[in-house]
Amino acid sequence: MAIFTPARRGSVTLFMKATPALKGAPAKVVYDGDGLSGVLTGNQPMRFLGCDTPEVAYTVPTGPSASRPRQKIGDALWGAYLDAPLAPGAWPEFKQKLHPLVEQRFLAVSGPGSAANHAHHAGKARQALIDLIEGDRAALGIAEADFRLFVAVTHEVFDGYGRLLAFVNTDVRDAALRPTRTYNERMVANGMASPFFIWPNVDPFIGRPAVTDAALPPRELRKAAGRSRLGRSRQDAAAARAAGLGIYDPANPLRLLAYELRMLGDRKAPSRWVIDLSAEDGDPTLYPPDGYVLISNPEDRLFVPAEYVPLFAQRGWQPARLVRF
């Protein structure tokens, strides 16, 4: 479904192209002195919120000072890199030194076969989403040309790549026919995607009148997270793991999570702080970015962008520090 194409200019501004919504005189398009009706044209990349699937392609380091963009994870370059991504002097330096806990995590899940493992699960996830969309269209008897998506955005509209950050579902007016779970949620429930919850772009926090209202005290936040769609998605992920679905296949589980592969590709340390949703309700610990590895299951990690840490501290959270050893 064509929406619009953003084009990057500089580092932060996104420009989009549009045409007037109606042909003819401006009087048919302009509705007041600071607004008009337009059609945004082009193809709009989207990034699903609340989930993260293995990468099909990404930037791969190729030497001490070189990288190559958009390389398929299953190719020889990625294989060579993920065989030993922390080898001293072989690759660009990390922009910020990794904590030993993260180093241990990367060493445990990289090594021979890691790239092939990631590529395998990336292909499975891509096909799974295709099958979900085609299944919806066939079940509803909608022609391909008439199929539409319902796209919901939240606090953040675009990511750094110009992709629309969204929850996506089949656009069906009849509520009885509409799937009860978005594609985002169904990919998690089917074991095709890992949960990836970033505050405040997940329910129940997106329903607050202001972003400042979405930063809840520890006990209130955990209770809200357990009752909402977030809680349901966490349960779905745990059930998929217990059933050995997709990325949890006991014979070939996903080794590197997608955001870990991106960290390795970019040679960047973790940047978002994280809350353990599985901890005791009153636990006020706000883990620093490297501390995500201390929380065993991805569905129990609620990531908090660094700029919001002072707001969480005002709500009773206690930013922690990790001892380096």
Image: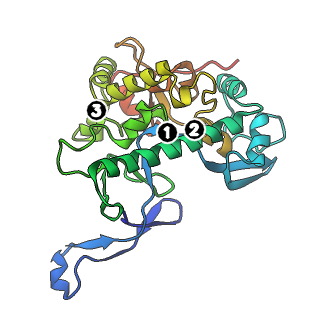
The numbered mark, 3 or 1, whose residue comes first in the sequence reads: 1
The answer to whether mark 1 and mark 2 are in CB contact below 8 A is yes
Residue 224 spot, x, y in % from top left: 28, 24
Q: Mark 2 Cα within 10 Å, few/some/many (few <14, many 20+)? A: many
Residue 180, quarter of picture: top left
Residue denoted by label 3: 204
The image quarter in which residue 101 lies: top right
Q: Which residue is mark 2?
A: 258
Residue 63 placement, left or right of 319: right
Horizontal and vertical percent position of residue 306: 47, 36
State the residue at coordinates (42%, 53%). 158
Q: CA distance from mark 2 to mark 3?
A: 24 Å
Give the quadrant of residue 255. top right
Say which label, 1 or 2, has the lower sequence index.
1
Measuring from the top left, give residue 125's x and y in whole percent: 52, 41
Between label 3 and label 1, give the one nearer the viewer.
1
Query: What residue is rendered at 21% in x and 44% in y?
Result: 177
Mark 3–mark 1 distance (CA, rounded to whole Å): 19 Å
* Secondary structure of the residue carrying numbered label 3: loop
User: Amino acid type of disc 1?
Assistant: Asp
Residue 273: give x, y in percent of width and height. 49, 30
- Label 1: few (<14), some or many (≥20) within 10 Å? many
> In the rendered image, which residue does mark 1 sit on?
52
Nearest the camera: 321 or 94? Answer: 94
Q: Which residue appears at 34% of the width and 19% of the height?
A: 218
Give the residue type at disc 2: Ala
Please rate how many residues cluster around mark 3, counting C-alpha atoms within 10 Å: few if below 14, some from 14 to 19, many from 20. Answer: some
